Image: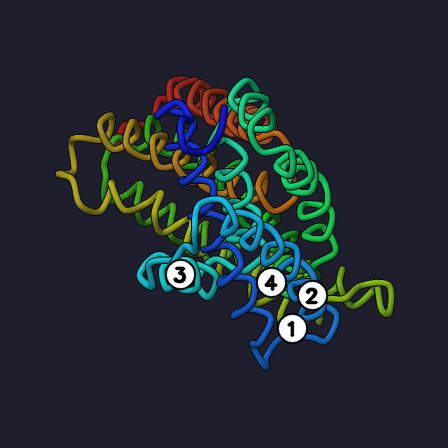
Amino acid sequence: MTIMNMAPHLLKALKRFQANESMGYEVYRRLSEDPRLSFDNAETLRKIAEHEKTHVEIFAKYLGPEVSKPSRIERMLLRSRILGFTFTLKRMEMIQARVMSKAIRQELIQVIPELDFIFQEEDMIDMDLLSLLDEERLVYVSSIVLGLNDALVELSGAIAGFTFAMRNNRLIALAGIITGISASLSMAASEFLSTRADGNHSKKTPGKAALITGIAYVLTVSLMVLPYILLPEDQYLISLAIMLGVVISVIAVFSFYVSVTRAESFKKQFGVMAAISLSVAFASFVIGIMVKNALGIEI
């Protein structure tokens, strides 16, 4: 079999892979030229760009040159600015790795033996090099995790308890906001002292770590309290259901981000956080009912 009489599905897969490699080369090249990057990060991205360029040249021998769509490249660069280059590039490589199955890869290698080199390099070298990237925002992921986790676990439980103790959306929102703001200040202070105590062993600056932890906490609490503010006072059960949905959504989004940047299992990350948050919420929910009934308080 040759390129000229290659099966349509193989040719389609090959052209798609070529398009991805061409786009990858441009993305890596342009990111490596960003003056804001450290020398080490720029050098790592430049090396990956060189690998991608080699792949593009091999494809061009068989399929002709591929001109990447500027819109695709600009979208990737925009994501990099918003979500960070580590997440964007690792996600891009993960998607490209799923473009074709192992069976199709083997069929293509039979036609173009040089593809074996490309596939092996894609599977190993690029991801290994990506693991060398040292992005500042990832240094502070632990601070975000601290703020999110504590807000999700502590406040989901507290709000669930308030829901059945108070049975009034406005009172629940008020209690949640007061508790959330107080807890966010406490967590920010704890992170400041913890980072300061680490001294030279930590890449984080105490003030920035504390600020990020506090902001993550406040934003999470705001999302959790919002249903109680927007819905009528007597619809506290619906508000509780929405709040728990918000908790699951926040956990899912952040677990996905962390799983990509740290090359960890999304299911494991999500499962642990969701199980803990929902278990605490359920326990607090029951405690709220028991305390209310035991004290005979009616609101």
Secondary structure at numbered mark 1? helix
Q: Amino acid at mark 2?
A: Phe
Q: Amino acid at mark 1?
A: Gly
> Marks 2 and 3, how far apart in space?
39 Å
Q: Which residue is mark 3?
A: 73
Furthest toward the left, the residue is: 232
Give whichever of 55, 20 is nearer the camera: 55
When the figure is inspected, residue 189 is found, relative to residue 205, above or below; the finding is: above
How many other residues sit within 10 Å of disc 1, few (<14), some (14-19) or many (≥20)?
some
Q: Amino acid at mark 4?
A: Arg
Q: Name which residue lies at 34% across and 64% down.
A: 70
Q: Which residue is mark 2?
A: 192
Q: Position of residue 168 (x, y in %)?
A: 23, 36
Res 207 label: 1
Circles 3 and 1 in contact, beta carbons < 8 Å: no
Q: Which residue is mark 4?
A: 137
